């Protein structure tokens, strides 16, 4: 795992080999971040990273100027791994939460500019997650951006989808309140 751009560019981490992680490849990560950077400036943004796994995506947001990143995962090993990186590199603006994604969403008022979610490809509540986010007050009332990483065979046709990208079997659907 490595950071592709920004203040932490080139920083490499030992890949955590948990059986519940699927780190986003460098190619896919670089592609989606380049696409997003062409439409928004990450500087000073608040970001939530659901199903954070190794923290790969959250670290990329931090490196590119996000003010704070809130990484959420419910697996103890993933939390330990992220906390070790946070401590080693003194990343005080990286907030790590051990919690189920839906529990976090329902118990924390969303004030983030970007919600990034990378659930397991076989996540049974994928469509529930999308529906919940798109119908949330947070999404409906502001300029919020929701980025969902998913397997390529899933297609989201909601009117809020403004960007779709695919890299191998990894796809990203980006939603914005229209």
Image: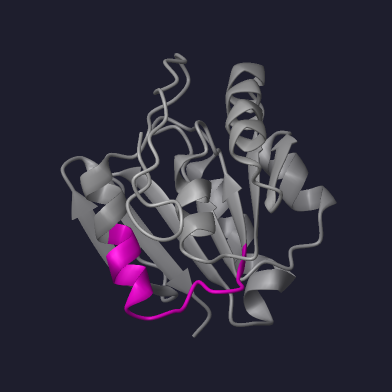
Q: Residue 173, how many percent across, how many down?
A: 36, 60
Marks counted in the figure total: 0
Magenta stretch: give its range: 32-46
Which residue occupies the foreground of this view, 29 or 171? Answer: 29
Residue for point 29% across, 69% down: 35
Q: Residue 31, how many percent across, how many down?
A: 24, 58
The answer to whether residue 155 of the structure is visible from this angle is: no
The answer to whether residue 98 of the structure is visible from this angle is: yes
Q: Does residue 87 sit above or below 41 in this rendering?
A: above
Q: Quadrant of the N terminus?
A: top left
- Colour basis: one colour
Quadrant location of residue 170? top left
Residue for point 31% across, 60% down: 32
Q: Does residue 75 sit above or below 57 in this rendering?
A: above
Specify whether 43 is left or right of 150.
right
Specify whether 27 is left or right of 112.
left
Which residue occupies the foreground of this view, 53 or 176? Answer: 53
Residue for point 45% across, 51% down: 8
Specify whether 34 is left or right of 79.
left
Specify whether 140 is left or right of 58.
right
Instruction: Pick out the residue farthest to the left.
Output: 168
Residue for point 65% across, 22% down: 80
Q: Does residue 80 sit above or below 167 in this rendering?
A: above
Q: Is residue 41 magenta?
A: yes
Q: Residue 164, how many percent across, how many down?
A: 28, 64
Q: Residue 3, how many percent across, how many down?
A: 38, 46
Q: Is residue 61 magenta?
A: no
Which residue occupies the foreground of this view, 100 or 126? Answer: 100
């Amino acid at each position: 795992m490595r950071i592709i751009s920004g203040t932490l560019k080139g920083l490499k981490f030992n890949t955590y080999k948990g059986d519940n992680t699927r780190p986003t490849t460098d190619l896919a990560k670089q592609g989606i971040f380049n696409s997003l950077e062409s439409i928004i400036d990450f500087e000073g943004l608040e970001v939530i990273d659901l199903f954070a796994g190794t923290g790969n995506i959250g670290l990329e947001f931090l490196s590119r100027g996000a003010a704070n990143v809130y990484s959420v995962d419910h697996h103890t090993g993933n939390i330990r791994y992220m906390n070790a990186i946070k401590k080693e590199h003194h990343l005080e603006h990286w907030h790590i939460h051990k919690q189920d994604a839906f529990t976090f969403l329902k118990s924390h008022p969303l004030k983030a500019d970007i919600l990034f979610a990378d659930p397991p490809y076989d996540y049974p509540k994928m469509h529930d997650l999308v529906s919940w986010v798109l119908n949330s007050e947070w999404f409906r009332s502001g300029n919020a951006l929701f980025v969902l990483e998913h397997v390529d065979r899933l297609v989201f046709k909601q009117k809020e989808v403004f960007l779709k990208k695919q890299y191998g079997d990894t796809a990203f659907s980006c939603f914005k309140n229209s």
